[in-house]
Image: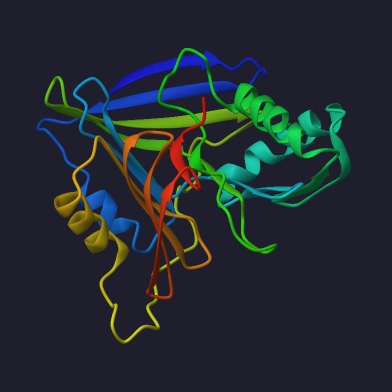
Amino acid sequence: MSPDSCRTEGGLSVHLEVEELSSPCDMSAMAEQLDRWRGAVLCSGVASRPDIGFVHPPLAVTLRRSHIVIEALNARGAVLIPSIAVLFYELDIFAELRAAGKRIAGRLNFANTTSQAIDALTKLVCPVADPNLRLYGAFGREGDSETRDTVLYLPDEILVADHAKGTGSILRYDFVAAGRSTRGLARATVAAPYVSHSASRRDPPSETFARLRMVAPAAYGALMNIGRGEFLIATTREMASGRVMRMKNGIAEVRLGNAALVSPAA
């Protein structure tokens, strides 16, 4: 184990422990976990970019038009909620804002203030010096008034597969916020399993993702369990566009172009 500590721009302390794996790893087993648990796998066919995967993220960020919700998915995420609430109350971009328990809900003044809220949150919880601890998610989805435009996760345990070195590692993070620490708190979150109501499509998302990568090879691929029975599956030539499949209740919807984006938030 290799420990390291740093502070974010927002003043949170972050402690990292790195477990080096004795053999190269792939993301197949991690992808299978996404059939039941929230999280994401981001795969790259580019040697300079590692594969990244995680489950049980402690924090979820959801945007629907001008509404934003920050939700703690376990006790570890609940440690961060008070500091995020203080940050948001200091920003002059909310028409409404309410923090209660493990949840913060707000309505932004204008749609273009969304990026300000995400940027401020990133600076609070993500150290500049660590390229792996970031908000990961799906941006810019199109749909009806009930469709979530954006779903982001903050992970605190990340599997990294380095193609160039042929090695793998597990990055485990702990946070200290407002005098409270996540150290020793359980990482598990409530299950969000795939359930198919389609007689013709019973394969889990992980199998669909594996087949799609075989028949439509691309530089990047992503599988996300975004909760509420929804999964996003993507193959892209670039991080900002490509073929995206949305699965819910066994029904698949495929889009081409920029309607969806699966990538780390910078």
Q: Quadrant of residue 50?
A: top left
Q: x, y (%) of residue 8?
A: 59, 17
Quarter of the figure that contains the N terminus: top left
The residue at 51%/44% (across/down) is 185
Residue 158 falls in which quadrant of the image? top left
Instruction: Using residue 122 as the reference point, say whether residue 222 is left or right of it.
Output: left
Q: 96 or 72, which lies in front?
A: 96
Residue at 31% x, 63% y: name it. 205
| Residue closer to the observer: 264 or 32 | 264
Horizontal and vertical percent position of residue 23: 9, 33
The residue shown at (44%, 34%) is 240
User: Residue 3 placed where, x, y %?
Assistant: 37, 19
Query: In this view of the protein, can residue 22 be seen by the observer?
Result: yes
Q: Is residue 119 above or below residue 107?
A: above
Q: In the rendering, at what x and y percent does residue 148 appear? A: 61, 55
Residue appearing at x 51%, y 24% in the figure: 266
State whether residue 178 appears in this view: no
Q: Left of 255 or right of it: where is 31?
A: left
